[in-house]
């Protein structure tokens, strides 16, 4: 049984002050009729008929009953505001959880994205935008035609705007001439690059990779890449995974009341996402290399921070090494595959367990 404390003081005839654990109150009245109020604002009226045992008690809350429409409207608006705040909170929670779930989906579907293929032979055989030195460029022709067609109107003549307008059109011709020259120089540069690429110039391969930046969206996840080549038919790529920075350690979900629940991600789920991410990126790297370069083989080494059991220290170790040939990749339906299972289509080294993740492997050597 809990202890209760209450003390009452008489301060005037019919008036008492009551002190208890929950606060302080006052009561006033005579035998058979009493009115009391406490510090929380609660009010109680008690009426009784002495000697009969019949009594009546009425209790009201602390809220005042306002009669004016403005006070009543204010109360309604406050209720609406609180309801709106609640809806906004629920919507923010929903969006946050959807963003979390969508990022997980992105991590596992990177292989579905790929750059458009570049046909270097078509570029090599392309015609110049115009014959420089023999004719005007297309932009300059269009600007010159605008000047030729210009006829000043009545108000242009009246306010002497004719000369100003002609000068502006002449300046447009000069700008167009410079733009034509830039386009011609760009065409010349890309044709020279196409000639080097189709001739198997490995240095040109690296220049194209640097210029086109085919894997730039993967660097936003924190991944890093290095490229190597000893023959014009094979590109070797080292892929720094950084899975600890990419794969979340917690799972977010919505409760039945719309609040966000954050729980530790099960270790098996973490490793499953990790494997999908590594294999998805591997396929994406191969697709982009084949789209950009006229090579037949890509060798990809995924490295990550792993504990070296021989030294007891964490270091960069190879967790996946795979050799992918162009003909092998072309027959895959990227929208329907499980990217981890797809490694079985290629010569690869991978040791993975659902409860321990990746283990270090030997690299596949370039032929």
Image (tube, grey):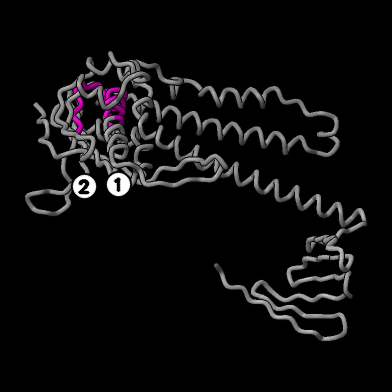
List x then y, in percent, for residue 340: 26, 27
User: Residue placed at 18% from the left, 32% from the top?
Assistant: 236
Confirm whether the magenta stretch covers residue 71.
Answer: no
Give me the disc on residue 244: 1
Q: Is residue 224 left or right of residue 55?
A: left
Q: Nearer the viewer, residue 313 or 228?
A: 313
User: Residue placed at 44% from the left, 47% from the top?
Assistant: 262
List x then y, in percent, for residue 291: 31, 23
Q: Quadrant of the N terminus?
A: bottom right
Q: Nearer the viewer, residue 163 or 350?
A: 350
Q: Residue furthest left?
A: 310
Q: Nearer the viewer, residue 135 or 69?
A: 69
Q: Magenta span covers which residues?
A: 280-301
Q: Is residue 125 left or right of residue 320?
A: right
Q: Residues within 10 Å of mark 2 (few under 14, many from 20)?
A: some
Which picture quadrant has residue 272?
top left
Note whether 340 is above or below 58 in the view shown. Answer: above
List x then y, in percent, for residue 66: 88, 58
Cα distance between the residues tagged 2 and 1 = 8 Å
Query: First in sequence: mark 2 or mark 1?
Result: 1
User: Residue placed at 67% from the left, 36% from the top?
Assistant: 168
Return the residue at label 2.
305
Is residue 212 shown to the viewer in this render?
no
User: Residue placed at 34% from the left, 41% from the top?
Assistant: 219
Q: Is residue 343 left or right of residue 94?
A: left
Q: Quadrant of the C terminus?
A: top left
Contact, mark 2 vs mark 1 (Cβ under 8 Å): yes
Q: Residue furthest right?
A: 68
Q: Residues within 10 Å of mark 1 (few under 14, many from 20)?
A: few
């Amino acid at each position: 049984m809990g202890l209760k404390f209450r003390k009452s003081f008489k301060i005037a005839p019919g008036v008492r002050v009551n002190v208890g654990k929950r606060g302080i109150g006052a009561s006033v009245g005579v035998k058979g009729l009493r009115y009391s109020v406490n510090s929380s604002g609660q009010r109680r009226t008690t009426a009784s008929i002495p000697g009969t045992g019949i009594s009546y008690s009425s209790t009201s809350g602390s809220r005042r009953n306002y009669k004016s429409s403005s006070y009543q409207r204010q109360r309604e608006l406050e209720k609406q505001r609180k309801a709106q705040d609640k809806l906004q909170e629920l919507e923010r929670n929903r969006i946050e959880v959807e963003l979390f779930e969508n990022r997980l989906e992105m991590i596992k579907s990177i292989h579905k994205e790929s750059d458009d293929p570049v046909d270097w032979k078509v570029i090599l055989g392309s015609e110049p935008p115009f014959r420089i030195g023999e004719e005007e460029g297309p932009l300059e022709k269009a600007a010159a035609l605008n000047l030729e067609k210009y006829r000043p109107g009545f108000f242009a003549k009246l306010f002497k705007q004719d000369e100003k307008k002609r000068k502006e059109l002449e300046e447009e011709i000069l700008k167009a001439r410079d733009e034509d020259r830039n386009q011609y120089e760009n065409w010349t540069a890309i044709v020279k690059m196409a000639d080097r690429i189709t001739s198997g110039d490995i240095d040109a391969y690296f220049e194209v990779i640097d210029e086109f930046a085919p894997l730039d969206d993967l660097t936003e996840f924190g991944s890093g890449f290095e490229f190597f080549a000893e023959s014009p038919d094979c590109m070797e790529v080292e892929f720094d995974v950084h899975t600890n920075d990419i794969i979340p350690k917690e799972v977010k979900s919505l409760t039945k009341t719309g609040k966000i629940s954050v729980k530790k991600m099960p270790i098996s789920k973490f490793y499953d996402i990790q494997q999908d991410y590594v294999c998805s990126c591997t396929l994406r790297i191969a697709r982009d290399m084949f789209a950009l370069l006229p090579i037949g083989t890509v060798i990809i080494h995924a490295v990550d921070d792993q504990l070296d059991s021989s030294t007891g220290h964490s270091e960069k170790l190879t967790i996946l090494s795979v050799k992918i040939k162009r003909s092998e990749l072309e027959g895959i339906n990227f929208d329907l595959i499980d990217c981890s299972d797809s490694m079985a289509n290629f010569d690869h080294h991978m040791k993975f367990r659902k409860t321990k993740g990746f283990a270090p492997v030997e690299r596949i050597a370039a032929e």
